[in-house]
Image: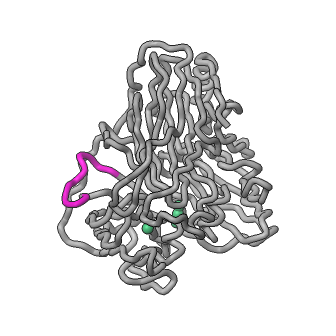
Amino acid sequence: MNRILRLQLLLLQLLATSACERSTGQVVAALMPGLIQPPEALDEDPAADRIRVTLIAEATAHGYTYSGSSPGPTIVGRVGDYLEVQLINRLDAPTTIHWHGLTVPVSEDGVAPLVGPGERRVYRFPLTHAGTFWYHPHFDTAAQVDRGLYGMLVVKTSDQPALPELVLIFDQPLEQQVHDEPPAHGHGQLVERWQVNGVAQPKLALPGGSVVRARVLNASNYGYLDLRLPNLGIIAKDQGLLPGWDPEPLILGPGDRAELELRVGPADFEIQTNPYTLNGGARWGEPQTLLTVIADPPAPLPKSADWPFMAAPSPPDPGATDIVYAFAGSDRIGHWLINGQAFPNITPESVAVGSRPIIELVNVSPTEHPFHTHGSHFEILSIDGVAPPFRRVEDTLNVKIGQKVRLRLLADVPGEWMVHCHILPHAEEGMMTMLRIE
Ligand code: C2O
Ligand code: CU
């Protein structure tokens, strides 16, 4: 399945220039069909600040698609745009679309109501924050996402360098089959069969000297990425640009995103992931190559772009705690719990609209969990007592075994919101609760 995909610097630059002149920005490389890029969603609304997109959920011989592709079309907008997405359900099962990482009114969040087979509905909301988001069903989520229902949603601002961009969605196909019939080795080591935008180990030819912005998503049901990143700087996490952040390695759990600055120089390089185990045991196996970048033609390594990083200080921890979420459970008992409760038998917590509740996450389970909130983002106050060096806003955060994480929730949008682990089998086996913002 390896393909060498070539693109011309000139074309990239042309596309980059035209992109910044459009009212709805383009993920530049998405325009190039050979570049293992998901198609870009078509904007059916002529108004400059409105985007209207149709997504048709459909079953094909190769799985589920949105408008014929998996990953689905990349939706690109700018802060201030108003987005309308019409979902047409041609599956033989109900579905929905959830806008992971976006702040939308609760009626548009895609948890309820269900859109039945043959039905359609329109989701409508303004794009309020820049960042790299994604969309996926929130009904029978593990099965529908596993079959290929997901896509990227990029929200841009006009103050950022007009660079060519790539969408890199990492996933492992048919994970639910493996999960439902677990392989013999059941000690947390994950089967590694990664694909990039649906292609195994693609090769990507980029001209030496180019600087490309790569938007990365882990769309896997339960696979973790432990990325090795030569020639790459991490410029952003879930909710926009972050200054000087250089975790080594970059661990991306299910549902998590990052943005990378990819600099192509004199030599080819690979993006690899190391084997990962969720339960703290020894890892075995070799690093797996996810993607090879071919420097074609080679050239000296270019400088970093001039990113408008916002280096706000991390907010102080007031010390008190409003909500504790303790994660427990195990595969052996087949239940995953938050505060001893398995969804739907839960007691929702409540906080006031506009408040800044302090949430403490405690992981007393034998495995890691990517914690995800709908409807609001959170600032990280500390991880195991250590505050981040700058304000870090996230909507999906991996919590390791035994870890204690303190968060400040930006509880601005009223509603009853899902809060859950983004390991999809864990969510389905109970690790979900609700938070009322009222
Ligand atoms: Cu990405 Cu509740 O979901
Ligand atoms: Cu979990």
Instruction: Say whether residue 428 is left or right of residue 46.
Output: left
395 or 409, nearer to the observer: 395
Please give the range of residues in magenta: 383-392
Q: Is residue 270 visible?
A: yes
Point out the image quarter for the C terminus: bottom left
112 vs 282, nearest the viewer: 282
Residue 248 lies, in percent from the top left, at 32, 41
Figure quadrant of residue 356: bottom left
Location of residue 156 with respect to 7 vertically, above or below: below
- Which residue appears farthest toward the front when viewing the image? 184
On the image, which quarter does residue 197 sit in? Answer: top right
- Whether 388 is among the magenta residues is yes
Residue 253 in the image: state x and y as whole percent: 44, 55
Task: Let me know if residue 148 is in the magenta part.
Answer: no
Quadrant (top left/top right/bottom left/bottom right) for the N terminus: top right
Q: Main secondary structure of the magenta part?
A: loop
Residue that appears at 26% across and 46% down: 390
